[in-house]
Image (cartoon, helix red, strand yellow):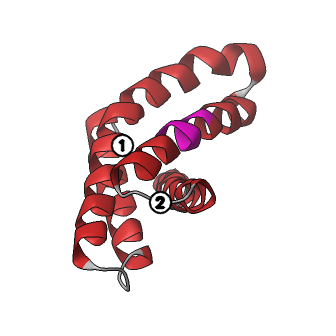
Amino acid sequence: MDQLAALLASMVVEGVTVALLFSRLERPKLVRGVGVAVLATLATHPVAWWSIGAAEPVVGYWTAVLIVETLVCLAEAIAYRLVVPLAWPAALGVSVAANAMSTLAGLLYYAVAS
């Protein structure tokens, strides 16, 4: 999967994940949450893609993924906190859930495609 396809897949997976998590909230929070999921992924995915590639030779693939995804979750949690807005624990939980789903989708893709 090339970077553009991975970005688009991540935006869809994270947007759907957040929509499901926010489905019982009032409509404005749902819309803002999905917007944050898509726009934050658009902003962080290219940096994460490059960072994992750059860190992998130094720390190994799985450590690079763990470090980069942790930083991505923290950055995106700030967006959920400020834009939706959510309390810090909820913002971090939503960010971790959305990013875990997109990371899992990518790993499943590579497992099946290999």
Please name the amino acid that badge 2 sits on.
Answer: Leu
Q: Which mark is residue 68?
A: none
Relative to 13, does residue 24 appear above or below in the rendering? below
Residue 99 included in the magenta stretch of the image: no
Q: Which residue is mark 2?
A: 86
Question: SS class of the residue under badge 2?
Answer: loop
Q: Residues within 10 Å of mark 2 (few under 14, many from 20)?
A: some
Q: Which one is closest to the eye, mark 1 or mark 2?
A: 2
- Is label 1 in contact with label 2 (beta carbons under 8 Å)? no
Circle 1: residue type: Thr
Whether residue 112 is visible here, answered yes or no, is no
Counting from the top left corner in percent of width and height, residue 75 is at: 50, 36
Relative placement, left or right, of 110 versus 3 is right
The label shown at residue 41 is 1
Separation of marks 1 and 2 at Cα, in angstroms: 18 Å
Q: Which residue is at 68% across, 15% downward? A: 57
**6 with respect to 60 (left or right):** left
Per the image, label 1 sits on a secondary structure element best described as: helix
Residue at coordinates 39% horizontally, 67% vertically from top-left?
18
Q: Is residue 52 above or below residue 93?
A: above
Q: Earlier in the sequence, mark 1 or mark 2?
A: 1
For the record, the magenta segment spans: 71-75
Magenta region, mostly helix, strand or loop?
A: helix
Where residue 85 sits, quadrant-wise, is bottom left
Spot occupied by residue 28 in the image (x, y as percentages of width and height): 23, 69
In the image, residue 20 lies at what x, y percent?
39, 78
**Residue at 75% in and 32% down:** 63
- Say left or right for 24 vs 62: left
